[in-house]
Image (cartoon, helix red, strand yellow):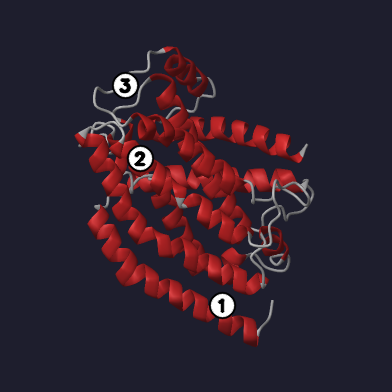
Amino acid sequence: MSILAILLGLAFGGWLMAALEGWAVHGRFSLVRPLASALALLGREGVVTRKSDRLFFEAAPILLLVAGLLAAAVIPLAPGLIVADLATGALFLNAALAYVLVALIMAGWGPDGAYAMIGGWRFLGQFIGYSMLIVMPITAVAMRAQSLSTTQIVTSQAALWNVAYQPLGFALFVVAAMALAWLPPFDLPSGAGDLAGGIEAEYTGPRLAVLRLARMVVVLTLAGAVSTFYLGGWLGPWLPGWAWSGAKTLAVAALMLTLGRHIPRIREARFLELCWKAGVPLALVNIFLVGVIALVVPI
């Protein structure tokens, strides 16, 4: 039952993500528009490029969706409401999300198109930048919980949420999550202005529908990870745990979808420079501060 509830939650959350993205882009919030767009895509013919690598072309959207679902499997919605309560859940989440890169490289290479390939390589540049900013904040979160289990990480925040305990790690993790989901201002892999869709350029019909659904699942999963690691997950008064998890996840997703649209795009080379010259040292400072606080004032 928990697996079914989480899958239904992901489907509902993906629908809301699409509605929120439409609001962020067009300024209009409509719950009907995502359904109409999905039906329109499913009804269109799926076109395949003449010299495509068919295996990569077909597998990329599915792999991206599977990566998002695997990462979501270790995110708890409430006590006992989790697909796989692994002792190394936080590590598993990071490993599953690594396949987002594989899926986008396949999506760029498979169609044998210039725009798609450039989009895939742009994402590789972003990956080299944000990868350490995913791992190092998780390390600091696990230090406080003394566990890599996502449920233990939530319960360790009963006295104080990690967003207050380690705000620097929270900020770095959110930036890395936005880059992983190639959201503005890190949307160069699908830059509409210069790449005509980038990694989505050669996808049409049902394949494009799966690709866009997979992206929404990745965004939702990352928002759930932020809620779990920094906002206390299911912890909160009055409402049931799953309601708190859902509300926090949707709030973080709305922030991720809207925040970057007011910031100019950042070139992947510039992003890489900022991450390695500023982000990694700040992440090390965050780990050091968490260790010192844990020794002096255990919370």
How many residues crowd around disc 3 within 10 Å: few (fewer than 14), some, or many (20 or more)? some
Amino acid type of the residue that numbered disc 2 sits on in the rendered structure: Met
Amino acid type of the residue that numbered disc 3 sits on in the rendered structure: Val
Instruction: Check the image and report above or below for 237 versus 26.
Output: below
Secondary structure found at label 3: loop
Instruction: Check the image and report above or below for 10 versus 239.
Output: above
- Name the front one of labels 1 and 3: 3
Reading the image, the residue beneath label 3 is 48
**Mark 1 vs 3, N-terminal side:** 3
The reply to whether residue 264 is in sight is: no
**Residue 106 circle label:** 2
Please state which of residues 183 and 83 is positioned toward the viewer in this rendering: 83
Marks 2 and 3, how far apart at CA: 15 Å
Secondary structure found at label 1: helix
**Residue 85 circle label:** none
Give the left or right position of residue 3, taking residue 60 as reference: right
Q: Position of residue 65 (x, y in %)?
A: 50, 37
Marks 1 and 3, how far apart at CA: 51 Å
Picture quarter with the N terminus: top right
Instruction: Check the image and report above or below for 222 versus 5.
Output: below
Please state which of residues 125 and 196 is positioned toward the viewer in this rendering: 125
Q: Position of residue 219 (x, y in %)?
A: 49, 43
Q: Residue at x 41, y 60 (%)?
A: 131
Q: Residue at x 49, y 74 (%)?
A: 286
Give the left or right position of residue 240, taking residue 98 as reference: right
Q: Position of residue 152 (x, y in %)?
A: 71, 63
Marks 1 and 2, how far apart at CA: 38 Å
The reply to whether residue 74 is in sight is: yes
Reading the image, the residue beneath label 1 is 290
Q: Residue at x 40, y 13 (%)?
A: 44
